[in-house]
Amino acid sequence: MPNFCAAPNCTRKSTQSDLAFFRFPRDPERCRIWVENCRRADLEAKTADQLNKHYRLCAKHFDPALVYRTSPYRTVLKDTAIPTIFDLTSHLANPHVKHRKQIKELTEEDLRRIKERRLASSAEKSKKEAATEDHSADEPQMSAEEKQLRDYLRSLFEVVLTLAKQCIPLETFKALDGGNVSNNFQALLEYRMHAGDEALRKRFEAMPVNAQFLSSVQLSQLLDVCENTVREEMLMEAREGRFFSLVTDDLVDFGGDKHLPLFLRFVNQHNVLREEFLDFVSFDGDELALVERLEAQLTERWGLSMEDCRGQAHKVTGASATKMKAVAVLLMEKYPLALHMPCSRMALNIHLANSLPFPNVQVLMETLRRLAAAFKSVPAQAWLETFISSHYPKSDEKAAALRQACSDGWTEQHNVFDVLLDILPPLVSCLDTIRDNADGTFDAAAVASAYSLVEILADFEMVMTAVVLRSVLTFTRAFGRNLQGETLDAFCAANSLTAVMHSLNEVNDNIDVYHEFWYEEAANVAASMEIPVAVPRLFVQRQRATDMGEIQAEAYYREYVTLPIIHSVMQEVEEMFSEVNLKVLKCLSLVPAIMGQMKFNTSEENSADVYRADLPSPDTLPAELHCWRIKWKHRGKEVRLPTTVHETLQLPDIKFFPNVNAFLKVLSTLPVLRMEEQQGATAGERLRAYLDAVPAKLWNRSLAVLNVNAHVKPDLDVMVDKYCRLYPEDDTELEAEPEEEDTK
């Protein structure tokens, strides 16, 4: 929400400038000094807690030396900061204007008290300075060698951060193959040294011949310190916001070991929604081991409380989706408010298809991901568009629509199966052409990929699976698009689930009729592509091995494709949108625009029980909600209703509705809702960009974390201090290395 400066004659607010705003201190003595310096008589009667909660001063009233920035999102004051810069005279130019923030006229008693306080403060400061001088005289000053070591470590940390920011891997392919070449880290150090870095040059001159700047163990320690320092900046904000949700992404393979990318979604102290990438978690072991590993990471290492987790979403694909579904269930058993929901970064229909534990569905979903990768190249996409145009020569509008539909990202859209079936014939023809590669346009990898893709797509089982998925998920498509759309659409989606389930139940009750239509459609598609309609070969072999009677194709696909898909989709929708989940989503009616759409006839009290323990004053909730509705119902004609949770949280008077404020903060963290007011790429997009930019063999966990969080600007001196504190023996070794070489 916007913060207004409490200083007299200061009209600044946070929405009109990039200035930081600081709360009045909770310490009564320091708070009293702030009030005295402000000269606001109306603030003298308020307690330190009241001032801390409701009043701010902007950074313009502090000496710039007392203000420093720890990250792009965080500006802090020194612990002893006192505001001293105020405009106490400009109001005199307009004596007839009544000012809201009236300046107190100081009496002789006030002046005497302020003078005594300043003298006492000055005497105390002198004592401290004298004590500091005596203490510093007893302490040894930093030696030239120690200062040189710190400068050297600063240079190392700067190189690490540069490598991470520019997506430069530590190793090269030649180094991985055992070639006699220096790695990228060493090469960049040498470049800096030749460019005039004295700390590196002195270190190099003192080292033995042919020795590396530092060992692989020390490099790993540098990376750990960098990574932990950057992560701590984000965790500080997450702890201040208290409530959070867990979001995981698709698995990443580091040297043969699968790891789970872990994101945290939270609302910071400025009521701004953040989703930050924190780390990779090992995917080894069973579901229970993974749950224990996640808990240990979040609580023991990062200082968060799982009791404050309000949601979880897992974007894992393939066979691992089943394991993550079990993990979500185990987490909810221990922490009932960690609601399992679909992720807003993945279309609901894609999520539902990924969650189906059937080999034919999983093969089709993996094929879609491979198609997206295969047609990223411009020549392949151009060939596909050409084949689409030639396949629909009499319908230019349809051809143009399909060319537009199959542009970048079509395999991640809600209507992916509709598009797939529409372009399947020209798609297979295009892949055949790439496989033949008559003109040598494509490399061997593209040809091999096209060959395997054709073998999968030109199979009746895949065609039938695509038709059934398209037909069943048609009923959830609009629901999913609304759920992950604007706030009003998400609220409407929460109230339309009954209709979705009614439609799915109607299909299930008449599945024989629907299956007949779907089978006929799949057979027609197959006939147009000259694909034989047959039972899968492996099933036929099992039949013969067990002397079972022969099964007809239509009966087989009813039993093993249609029925499992419709039943599993219904079960998944019911689990993902339980009664509690829907209750929570219906609390979106707290957003004023939704209240207006409902003619201010809403009943959030019925849904408030879920988060009652999270509210600061739950007993006053009914009265507060009544005031909240009245405020917006009887607003002025020129007042526009806020349309999103983010916009509502930024209202200046939201602080007067503490329960509503708490409700909206918790709702913001739910991973099913779309990120609002996002500037630039999301953390998930930045992670994907790093993985795309760096060859898989050269991926590095720490560099990935640093690259994704390059917007965090860590303090190099803090890193150096932390390194020296954690690894003092390494400092000794670094100093001793030249002497040991001389001894030899």
Image (cartoon, helix red, strand yellow):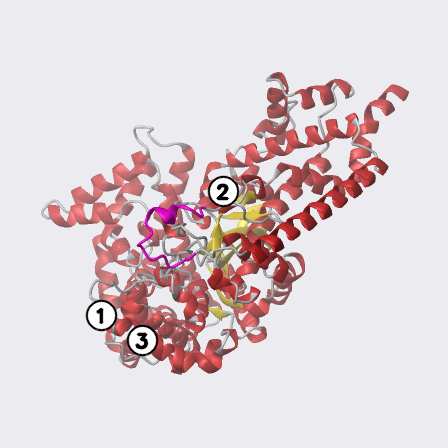
Q: Amino acid at mark 2?
A: His
- Image quarter (top left, top right, bottom left or bottom right) of the C terminus: top right
Question: Badge 3 is on which residue?
Answer: 629
Q: Residue at x 51, y 59 (%)?
A: 320
- The answer, for residue 598, to whether it is visible in the render is yes
Q: Residue at x 64, y 29 (%)?
A: 155
User: Is residue 212 on the magenta stretch?
Assistant: no
Q: Residue at x 47, y 54 (%)?
A: 275
**Foreground label between 1 and 2:** 2
If you read the primary sequence from the N terminus, does the residue marked by circle 1 or circle 2 appear first? 1
Of residues 327 and 101, the one nearer the viewer is 101
Q: Residue at x 64, y 20 (%)?
A: 193
Question: Badge 1 is on which residue?
Answer: 517
Looking at the rendering, the stretch of residues picked out in magenta corresponds to 87-102
Examine the residues drawn in magenta and state their main secondary structure. loop
Task: Say what secondary structure mark 3 lies in.
Answer: helix
Q: Splitting the image into 4 quarters, where does residue 113 fall?
A: bottom right
